[in-house]
């Protein structure tokens, strides 16, 4: 099959074609840009939900249960499950699917595992492309499960419409929740393993952190800006009409699906709110902007790395830096001048 | 031309035995050989394995059986793959499999069978040399 045929079959929801199209996008195989261009007009319809949180917090189990809940409501679900690739061998053990295999015979659920392939930030470089394939081929929801994150893997915030940040009892004190980074990107907080001791404390700490911030820990307001304090100050009319989204704190026991229906309801409510106050347009614009700039930067950089003259100049400058004859900023500016001229 | 091609392998335990140490050892070895291993875990039906292999677009399906049901389960997976029109996936098996059963399994399309004592290096080498795409 050539890419045209794969695209037309994928858009008709032929599972094998969808799967092959994902490989084309993930591996940047020959023809991938044309294939991507062909599907892109069909994207933008799915509700993209990111599920992130520390390793072992129950993300995969939660994703499995969220998918089951949405299926029960007659919706279709695409899942992109990301696990880390080895920085040494490039290999990966992708184990998220293990918790979701009961959906494998359901045509309304498509699960794809991805290795990060050297990309930091909690997802793979190609994750956004894979999400677009599942969106274009008509899945109502696309769930992205990030790698187990620490404190600073926040790229999911630029890919998803709604980010559910999973926390579990026993990970640290109240200072952890007011640190910058991951804690700022949750549109919804899910405290999983609620049968464990310490769950009330985690909930109280998150609530306190939300109170300190006034409204949301970051992304909902200042990060996206649309109805943030500055807009309110300038007297934007609709800002006054819609109260700011305060990230709800939900408690779940993913293993038994307890609290999962509420997570789904809250994701839907969040989407409703985004659509209502214009933030959805803003979020998707930001995603498009970061994607466009990233691709341009990739293309520029690849063009440079492939050019022997540039490489030679870079190496010459690098020697000067290594011998302490020049500082790295001067060398960088020097190289830039050479490239631009 | 293809910038990021990785060998993708589905490692699965079909049937009802609960012994997955062998499968995990193989999964780890393939990971260390630079492959992307999708591990689906215990008690998978042939239907689940084939569905997962298609969604994950794998180059290889590697199955481990220690229950003695290999002469039913392996051919069943091959049959389902054929029914779905999948002919470019390398299928290998492993586990406690008597020598006299191996020719029959190969006849139905299992490319190689690795029994106790096989080295993981051989498995890696076999996969690298025999993938169909």
Image (cartoon, grey):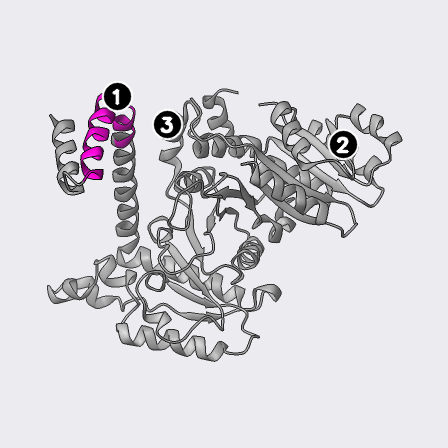
Write down the residue under mark 2.
B113
Q: Nearer the viewer, mark 3 or mark 1?
A: 1
Alpha-carbon neighbours of circle 3 within 10 Å: few (<14), some, or many (≥20)? Answer: few
Question: Which residue sits at x=13%, y=37%?
Answer: A333
Q: Secondary structure at mark 3?
A: helix
Query: Alpha-carbon distance for marks 1 and 2?
Result: 48 Å
Q: Secondary structure at mark 1?
A: helix
Q: Answer yes or no: do the residues labelled 3 and 1 have beta carbons within 8 Å? A: no
| Region in magenta | A301-323
Question: Is residue A158 placed above or below A220 in the rendered structure?
Answer: above
Write down the residue under mark 1.
A308
Write down the residue under mark 3.
A33
Foreground: A330 or A252? A330
Question: Is residue A107 placed above or below A96 in the rendered structure?
Answer: above
Q: Quadrant of the N terminus of chain B?
A: top left
Residue A310 magenta-highlighted: yes
Alpha-carbon neighbours of circle 2 within 10 Å: few (<14), some, or many (≥20)? Answer: many
Foreground: A238 or A15? A15
């Amino acid at each position: 099959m050539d890419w045209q045929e794969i695209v037309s079959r994928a858009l008709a929801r032929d599972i094998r074609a969808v799967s092959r199209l994902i490989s084309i996008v993930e591996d940047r195989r020959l023809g991938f840009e044309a294939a991507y261009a062909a599907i892109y007009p069909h994207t933008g319809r799915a509700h993209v939900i990111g599920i992130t949180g520390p390793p072992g917090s129950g993300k995969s189990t939660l994703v499995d249960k969220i998918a089951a809940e949405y299926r029960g409501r007659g919706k279709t679900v695409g899942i992109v499950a990301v696990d880390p690739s080895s920085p040494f061998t490039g290999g990966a053990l992708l184990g998220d699917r293990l918790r979701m295999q009961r959906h494998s015979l359901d045509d309304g659920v498509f699960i794809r595992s991805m290795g990060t392939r050297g990309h930091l930030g909690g997802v793979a470089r190609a994750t956004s492309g894979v999400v677009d394939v599942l969106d274009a081929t008509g899945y109502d929801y696309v769930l992205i499960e990030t790698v187990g994150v620490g404190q600073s893997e926040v790229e999911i915030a630029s890919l998803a419409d709604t980010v559910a940040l999973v926390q579990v009892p026993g990970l640290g004190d109240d200072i952890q929740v007011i640190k910058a980074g991951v804690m700022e990107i949750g549109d919804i907080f899910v405290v999983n393993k609620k049968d464990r001791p310490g769950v009330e404390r985690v909930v109280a700490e998150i609530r306190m952190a939300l109170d300190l911030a006034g409204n949301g820990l970051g992304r909902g307001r200042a990060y996206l800006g649309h109805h943030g304090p500055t807009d309110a100050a300038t007297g934007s009319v609709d800002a006054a009409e819609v109260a700011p989204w305060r990230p709800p704190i939900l408690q779940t026991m993913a293993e038994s699906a307890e609290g999962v229906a509420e997570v789904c309801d809250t994701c839907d409510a969040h989407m409703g709110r985004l659509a209502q106050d214009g933030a959805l347009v803003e979020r998707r614009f930001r995603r498009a902007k970061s994607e466009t700039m990233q691709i341009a930067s990739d293309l520029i950089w690849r063009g440079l790395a492939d050019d022997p003259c540039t490489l030679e100049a870079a190496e010459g400058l690098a020697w000067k830096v290594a011998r302490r004859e020049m500082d790295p900023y001067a060398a960088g500016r020097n190289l830039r001048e050479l490239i631009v001229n | 031309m293809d910038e990021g091609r990785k060998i993708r392998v589905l490692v699965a335990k079909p049937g009802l035995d609960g012994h997955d140490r062998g499968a995990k050892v193989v999964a780890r070895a393939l990971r260390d050989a630079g492959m992307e291993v999708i591990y689906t875990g215990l008690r998978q039906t042939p239907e689940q394995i084939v569905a997962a292999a298609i969604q994950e677009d794998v180059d290889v399906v590697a199955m481990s059986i220690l229950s003695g049901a290999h002469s039913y389960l392996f051919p069943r997976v091959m049959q389902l793959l054929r029914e779905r029109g999948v002919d470019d996936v390398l299928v290998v098996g492993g586990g406690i499999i008597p020598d006299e059963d191996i020719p029959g399994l190969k006849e139905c399309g299992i490319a190689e069978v690795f029994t106790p004592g096989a080295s993981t290096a051989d498995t890696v080498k076999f996969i690298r040399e025999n993938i169909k795409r």
